Image (tube, grey):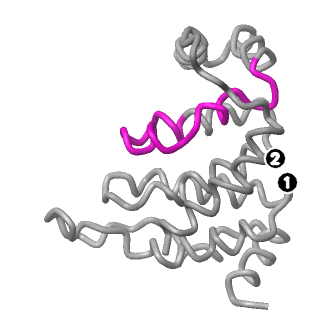
Amino acid sequence: MNSYRKIIDKFKSSKEESLLIDFKCIHNGKEAYGESDDINYINRKNLILELYEKYSAEDKTLIKWLLQEELKGFEFDIPVYTTDLCAFMLYKHMTIEDVYDLYDAKFGAGSDHQACIDIELIFGQNKDEIKAYLKSECTQKELNNEILETIECYELNKNAKFKSREEYIEYFETKKFEALKFDLG
């Protein structure tokens, strides 16, 4: 068992965030274009790739933590591909409340994320159920309206062909992941 898998398994059982110190997004302090970076990106990328090989709903806390660290890195121009992997893993094991994290993954970190992360993630397990939840949930009205408007804007595109949840999972696991793996080197 490699060291990344050991950390994944230890975190799954303990939820001790101290195990993740070497994976936190930390700016390297450089500001010049092409030099600004996250000093733990490579380490975190390797952890994400190892997690993707074998993950379950029990890993959701770790997936959400990694997603948040990835989103912090957009200011340093780290690649969006690892964010896409984290968002997909969350989507695959999501509950309806996870729509907020998935929306943030797509729209909360710049145009690269908007272009790379697919809208189907925000549609959740069932687009109509997500819309009904957002209309009825009262604690985040402004954000709910923003997400609803986004979904409705996408629905207005009569030429768009959205994948069902099953089709999207199949697409990601058989096609998109291979392209992401290539891009991640």
> Are the residues at dot 2 and dot 1 in contact (C-beta closer than 8 Å)?
yes
Other-residue count near label 1 (Cα within 10 Å), few / some / many at <14 / 14–19 / ≥20: few
Q: Nearer the viewer, residue 43 or 155?
A: 155
Amino acid of disc 2:
His
Question: Is residue 162 on the magenta stretch?
Answer: no
Residue at point 77%, 11% (across, down): 132
Amino acid of disc 1:
Ala
- Note whether 116 is above or below 158 in the view shown: below
Q: Nearer the viewer, residue 52 or 171?
A: 171
Where does residue 113 sit, x and y in percent of width and height? 45, 43
Where does residue 73 sit, x and y in percent of width and height? 40, 57
Which residue is tagged 2? 93
Tell me which segment is drawn in magenta.
104-127
Where does residue 21 sit, x and y in percent of width and height? 55, 75
Quadrant the N terminus occupies: bottom right
Which residue is tagged 1? 57
Q: Quadrant of residue 5?
A: bottom right
Whole-number angstrom distance, CA of label 2 to CA of label 1: 5 Å
Q: Quadrant of residue 52?
A: bottom right
Q: Quadrant of residue 29?
A: bottom left
Residue at point 57%, 16% (across, down): 159
Where does residue 95 sit, x and y in percent of width and height? 81, 36
Q: Secondary structure at mark 2?
A: loop
Outermost residue toward the front in this view: 159
Residue at point 68%, 49% (across, down): 88
Secondary structure predominantly adopted by residues drawn in magenta: helix
Left or right of 16? Residue 160 is left
Q: Nearer the viewer, residue 140 or 130?
A: 130
Residue at point 64%, 59% (across, down): 177
